[in-house]
Amino acid sequence: MTGDSIAAGMDYISALPDAILHIIFSDFPTKFVIRTSVLSKRWRHVWSDTPSLSIDCSEADPDSLNRTLANYSAPRIMSFDLRVSSKAHDIISLVEFAVSRKTEKLSLDFRDDCVYVYNFPGFFYTSSSLKQLVVDSGALDTIHVSWTSLRDLSLSFCKLSDASLAKIVSGSPLLESLTLHHCDNLGSLDLSELRQLKKLDIDNEGPTQIVAPHVHCLRLRHSHRQCSLEDVSSLTEAYLNIYCISCYYYKADLVQVYVLDMLEKLQSVKKLTFGAAFLQILSLAEICEFPFPMLKVEVLTLETMIVPSVIPGIAKLLQNSPGVKMLKLDIVSSKIILDADLNFYLDLKDLDQNQCWKPKDLDFSTSYEPKLMTSFMEFLMENTREDNLSQYNW
């Protein structure tokens, strides 16, 4: 490439409108965007008006961070991604800066420091501009919340009490999506006030009860701690799985009961996805002759490894889902309940572990994985109603 073509290319980029440059800048950390100011006079102040900021405090000393904020001139921030560390000596001022610039999408990541340390100031809970909020490893404890524009809230590894969550719910009337990952030890989660809430994503030790009558899409990955679905009457799509549990204790009986209770509440859901450990519990329930509900599912997705302990559960699901039109099998590497735990539980029930995992139409003469997979595929094709099933997706 000649010098003239390089210059022409640079002129072409410099001629782009600021709005286009800001879109390009939004994909890079702010520290790199600031470096463009040395290219020419044209570039000197372009970065300071970009409506997106991405700052990692662990990589910025306090003086340079203060200069960055002092030189930033955009009156409104569309997206602010802030990773906080011990080097950010004045966290309150950073949060105040985000609120003062009417930030719409705010991500606060405190993972570099001890979790559950940061208690947000009161003004943080009354930002009327926030539409999307992500908090990782913070502490939310408040007496009043007024997030009147908030649509999307995601909390991970946060210290969060039932009382605080209830105030967040009542103070966020327009919430459409709620994610709670590892915000453990929650009790009853009552979301009946949130009429706009369509998506609920929970991955943790709780809650023990979910009331979400307006939610359309539910993703629930939980532990052996019982979680009941009290009202999920608007669901059209659901993903369910559990953490690996030990079957050595009486809890395995309880897990089977509440897993089947969940299925009972999902009878009318058209699109269902089940993970491997959930399928294993369904297998135990089938072996122990628990009654299964009939399902109206039309799109059934199984995210699992093909191991003997998921087969009875899958077989029962297919038997009780006569309306399935699409069956999708995602072969994934996932945590499952150990065979030793499952077999120990079966021994306690005086059940023959050599026969329990063997549907009569399935060849388990060898544990060689390709042979098992082939036999499983043949089993699916033979035991799924051909008149209803329009598509397999492997």
Image (tube, rainbow, N blue to C red):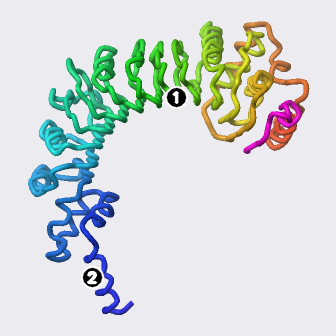
257 sits left or right of 125 in the view: right
364, above or below 99, in the image: above
65, above or below 140, in the image: below
| Residue located 20% across and 20% down the image | 144
* Mark 1 touches mark 2? (CB < 8 Å): no
| Residue located 60% across and 12% down the image | 258
Q: Quadrant of the C terminus?
A: top right
What's the amino acid at mark 2?
Answer: Asp
Could one spot residue 89 in this view of the protein? Answer: no
**Dot in front, 1 or 2:** 1
Quarter of the image where one finds residue 128: top left
Q: Disc 1 versus disc 2: distance between alpha carbons? A: 50 Å
349 sits left or right of 365 in the view: left
Could one spot residue 215 in this view of the protein? Answer: yes
Camera-side residue: 369 or 277?
Answer: 277
What x and y, as percent, mark residue 343? 73, 18
> Looking at the rendered structure, which numbered label has been put on residue 216?
1
What x and y, as percent, mark residue 21? 28, 66
Quarter of the image where one finds residue 322: top right
| Residue located 22% across and 49% down the image | 77
Local secondary structure at mark 2: helix
Counting other residues with Cα less than 10 Å from the Cα at mark 1, is it few (<14), some (14-19), or many (20 or more)? some
Query: Which residue is denoted by mark 2 in the rendering?
Result: 11
Local secondary structure at mark 1: loop
Earlier-in-chain disc, 1 versus 2: 2
48, above or below 321, in the image: below
Q: Is residue 109 magenta?
A: no
What x and y, as percent, mark residue 330? 67, 41
Camera-side residue: 250 or 4?
Answer: 4
> Looking at the rendered structure, which numbered label has been put on residue 380?
none
Magenta residues, start to end: 380-394
